[in-house]
Image (cartoon, rainbow, N blue to C red):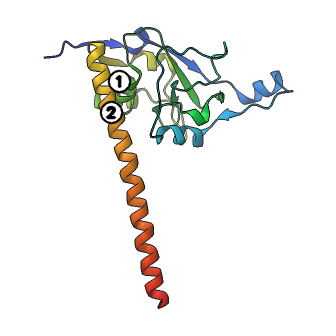
Amino acid sequence: MIYLEKRGLKEFVTFVPGINPTRAQKQFSTQVINYYDQSSFEADYNHEDVVVEDESKSLSQNNISLNEGDVVISNSLQLATMVGKINVGKVLSLNFTKIEFDSEKLDKRYFLFLFNAYKDVKRQKERELQGSGPVLRIPLRALGEIIVPVVPIKEQKKIGAIYAETLKLQSKLNKYADLIEQFTSSIIEETLKGK
């Protein structure tokens, strides 16, 4: 039996919003800013090998510049992922929120499981959605109020590892399914051409 308690996310993490690109352009007019965008998020979300260095600290003092292993939430998709090597150094825009872990009491991969897959957290996120139009967002204050189950860190690491391996397997299966579809289509097309 695992000892379980429920607590708000704000006890473990800080939510850091991205910057407004228009304001940043005015402030840093001489620099070209490479923004973390939706395709960056999708590349990280589908990434197979994200290495997490628990001891690594931010290379810059700037909270919006990303490092490998940082956890980022897509505000439009309400999903979280870990930043991979290809997106290191990119700057977070308003469409994303960076998660800073305040203590060693919450494992990053366990957080990803809770935020992306745990049904109770999904229901809480749905209740907090605000806005109009096609893009609904959860206010930062409400993100901090989300109640999560907290188990010992050893168990969190096990659950997080299982979740990460499941995502890797899903990614490989999706690639395999795409290859089968492409292969089948090419055979059918060649057959229809009479070759």
Q: Is residue 117 visible?
A: no
Q: Residue furthest bottom?
A: 194
Q: Examine the image and state in which quarter residue 16 appears.
A: top right
Which residue is located at x 43 percent, y 78 percent?
187
Query: Quick one: 35 or 165, which is closer to the camera?
Result: 165
In depth, the one of 128 and 41 nearer the eye is 41
**Is the C-beta separation of discs 2 and 1 under 8 Å?**
yes
- Whole-percent x, y for residue 73 in the image: 50, 29
Q: Check the image and report above or below for 187 versus 126.
A: below
| Between 24 and 32, the one nearer to me in the picture | 32
Q: Quadrant of residue 122?
A: top left
CA–CA distance in space, label 2 to label 1: 8 Å
Quarter of the figure with residue 185: bottom left
Looking at numbered disc 1 in the image, what kind of residue is underneath it? Tyr
- Looking at marks 2 and 1 on the same chain, the residue that comes earlier in the sequence is marked by 1
- Residue shown at 53%/31% (left/top)? 75
Would residue 71 be found to the left or right of residue 122 on screen? right
Residue found 81% across the figure and 23% down from its top: 28
Residue 9, given in percent of the width and then of the height, sits at 40, 15
Left or right of 35 in this view: 47: left
- Specify the quadrant that holds the N terminus: top left
Q: Alpha-carbon neighbours of circle 1 within 10 Å: few (<14), some, or many (≥20)?
A: many
Residue 110, label in figure: 1
Does residue 92 lie above or below 3 as drawn? below
Q: Identify the disc placed on residue 163.
A: 2
What is the secondary structure assignment of the residue under circle 2?
A: helix
Residue 15, how many percent across, how many down? 52, 17
Query: Residue 72, image x and y in percent?
Result: 52, 27
